[in-house]
């Protein structure tokens, strides 16, 4: 159920159907020379559509948050960077307002790695109010599944480029797709990280991307996300080994 399609009265009437909401979160950021600036918005958007097609009566879909923390790629044209401390505060108040409106559980469906710290900080504050939150970083949490479909992963790499080809292939300029084999040896922060590690605003091998791989990624991961959401709704947060 897309929240923005409902009147205030109808939202209140239908709130009893679901007390869980998804907030899709992305970024406006350079993705190589071949992918659109909205890449990190489009993947969560399509996941939400596919989830809504399957379980629309079980979950609310809140409006997407399009901007994110994109310091590393801010050297490239078109990137919009929101500092972590600012973004975490904004996300917190979005979540708090949803909680005040009767949403008791929240799914942050994240499309951009730079948002991770902000989402963690916001979630820590929201849970202290009594809200339950899960953060889904689709390319990271389901890396094992993705790597059964693609040979590799990366920022604007094979997996992400395939995803956007499936989302809307007219937005992708595959003739400009490149390869960047640089892989960090550690989680290191330094001022010119974006220019050096993400040369040409990408990592991995975008030239291997295909529409078919993107289709498979969305099919497989949508089912995995729905399974996770069902466990979240049911309160199945952990398992216990037999003693």
Image (cartoon, grey):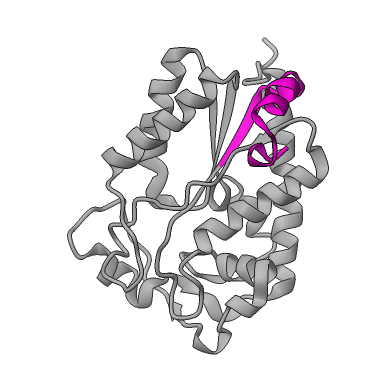
Measured as percent of width and height from the top left, residue 85 is found at 27, 38
The residue lying toward the viewer, choosing from 196 and 144, is: 196
Measured as percent of width and height from the top left, residue 2 is found at 68, 40
Tell me, yes or no, if residue 207 can be seen here.
Answer: yes
| Residue at image point 59% right, 51% down | 44
Tell me, yes or no, if residue 132 can be seen here.
Answer: no
Q: Is residue 94 above or below residue 96?
A: below
Measured as percent of width and height from the top left, residue 199 is found at 33, 75
- The C terminus, quarter of image: top right
Q: Is residue 209 above or below residue 173?
A: above
Give the residues drawn in magenta, as a range: 1-23
| Residue at image point 43% right, 51% down | 113
**Does the segment drawn in magenta span residue 20?**
yes
**Does the segment drawn in magenta span residue 179?**
no
| Residue at image point 69% right, 59% down | 217
| Residue at image point 26% right, 71% down | 195
> Is 215 situated left or right of 35 in this image?
right
Measured as percent of width and height from the top left, residue 131 is found at 52, 18
Q: Quadrant of residue 238?
A: top right
């Amino acid at each position: 159920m897309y929240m923005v399609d409902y009147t205030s009265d109808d939202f209140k009437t239908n709130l009893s159907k679901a007390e869980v909401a998804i907030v899709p979160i992305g970024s406006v950021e350079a993705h190589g020379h071949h992918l659109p600036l909205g890449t990190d918005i489009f993947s969560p958007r399509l996941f939400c559509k596919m989830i809504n097609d399957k379980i629309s009566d079980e979950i609310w879909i809140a409006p997407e948050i399009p901007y994110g923390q994109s310091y590393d790629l801010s050297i490239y044209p078109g990137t919009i960077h929101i500092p972590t401390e600012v973004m975490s505060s904004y996300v917190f108040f979005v979540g708090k307002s949803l909680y005040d409106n009767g949403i008791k559980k929240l799914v942050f469906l994240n499309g951009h790695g730079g948002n991770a710290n902000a989402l963690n900080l916001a979630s820590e504050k929201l849970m202290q109010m009594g809200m339950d939150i899960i953060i889904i970083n689709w390319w990271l949490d389901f890396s094992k599944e993705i790597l059964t479909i693609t040979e590799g992963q990366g920022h604007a790499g094979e997996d992400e480029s395939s995803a956007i080809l499936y989302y809307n292939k007219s937005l992708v300029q595959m003739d400009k797709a490149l390869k960047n084999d640089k892989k960090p040896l550690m989680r290191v922060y330094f001022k010119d990280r974006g220019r050096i590690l993400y040369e040409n605003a990408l990592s991995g091998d975008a030239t291997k991307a295909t529409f078919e791989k993107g289709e498979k990624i969305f099919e497989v991961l949508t089912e995995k996300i729905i399974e996770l959401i069902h466990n979240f709704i049911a309160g199945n947060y952990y398992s216990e080994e037999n003693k």
